[in-house]
Amino acid sequence: MESLDLLTNECINLLHKNKLLKPLIRAEITDSILRNEVIDKDLKEKEIEDFKKNLGIASENELENWLKVKEMNQSDLENLALKEIRLKKYCVKEFSNNVESHFLERKKQLDIVIYSLLRLKDFYIARELYLRILEKEADFGDLATLFSEGIENATRGIIGPVPLEQAHPTLRSTLRISTPGEVQPPIQIDGSYVIVRVESLDTAYLDDFMRSKMLLELFNKWLEEKTNEYNTNLLNQTNKVKNTFEDEKT
């Protein structure tokens, strides 16, 4: 990229020292690919007008003042206004073929669960409380507040919403096969006996929202790889020049 090629070795080292080199590279890579995405004229005008409206800009004078304060020009404004739609277009073009496989890899981390949990060291007390909840003799939240020995006693036993994958493996298996509202008998986990009830389990599906999320994840993964590669090459080139200069001095 021409903009990065203009950096001197001293500038590169200074940016790297202050952890600013990689963010700069990332921004320049993003800018270089998005500026080539052509947007339909009518859509372009609409996006720019919506962008100005969201900023509260209602007149040419207000626009001129805003650009002056931000030290930007009209082209900078358009790039900001069109960045999101250009990014979406680029992602669809470049990563659509990998969305399904990426989703399947990520699905376990995307399932979201809310559950009630009651944790005790004593199995017999846990069994008694389980039966009281099962027979509707007591409220799960009340018992969790009174008896649970974990931090969930401060939330009436409620955990979540959290990714299902974050749960302990033994608990995760129980949560995955449970029907919402069904109280499970005590299970032993890490020296405690746990009573659990799933309140809701939102299984991830590849709908339009999730597809957009997966596309963005694929883009960010690709961008991180390209940024690291460019960063390494720049630093290696800088160090090579530095070493050559030092060798010549000696």
Image (spheres, grey):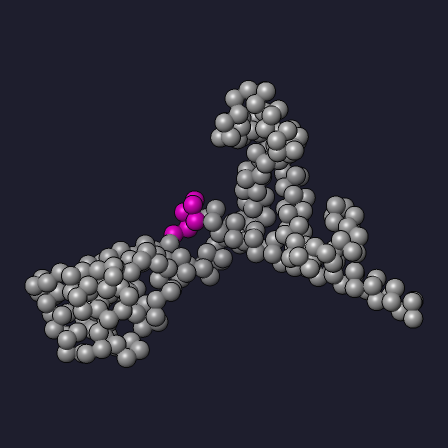
Measuring from the top left, give residue 22's x and y in whole percent. Answer: 65, 55
In magenta, the rendered stretch is 205-210
- Residue 243, quarter of the rendered image: bottom right
**Is residue 12 toward the left or the right of residue 207 in the image?**
right
Measuring from the top left, give residue 221's x and y in whole percent. Answer: 57, 56
- Residue 122, quarter of the rendered image: bottom left
Asked whether residue 1 is in view, the answer is: yes
Q: Is residue 144 magenta?
A: no
**Is residue 97 toward the left or the right of residue 129 in the image?**
right
Q: Nearer the viewer, residue 107 or 5?
A: 5
Q: Is residue 207 magenta?
A: yes
**Is residue 157 toward the left or the right of residue 204 in the image?**
left
Asked whether residue 182 is in view, the answer is: no
- Asked if residue 43 is positioned above or below residue 159 in the image, the reply reads above
Q: Nearer the viewer, residue 103 or 175?
A: 175
Measuring from the top left, give residue 224's x and y in whole percent. Answer: 60, 56
Residue at the (66%, 39%) spot, across then down: 36
Residue at the (49%, 30%) spot, across then down: 54
**Is residue 184 toward the left or the right of residue 203 in the image?**
left
Measuring from the top left, give residue 178's x and y in whole percent. Answer: 24, 64
Q: Nearer the viewer, residue 14 or 78?
A: 14
Residue at the (32%, 56%) spot, across then down: 161
Residue at the (28%, 79%) spot, across then down: 191
- Residue 234, quarter of the rendered image: bottom right
- Asked if residue 17 is positioned above or below residue 35 in the image, the reply reads below
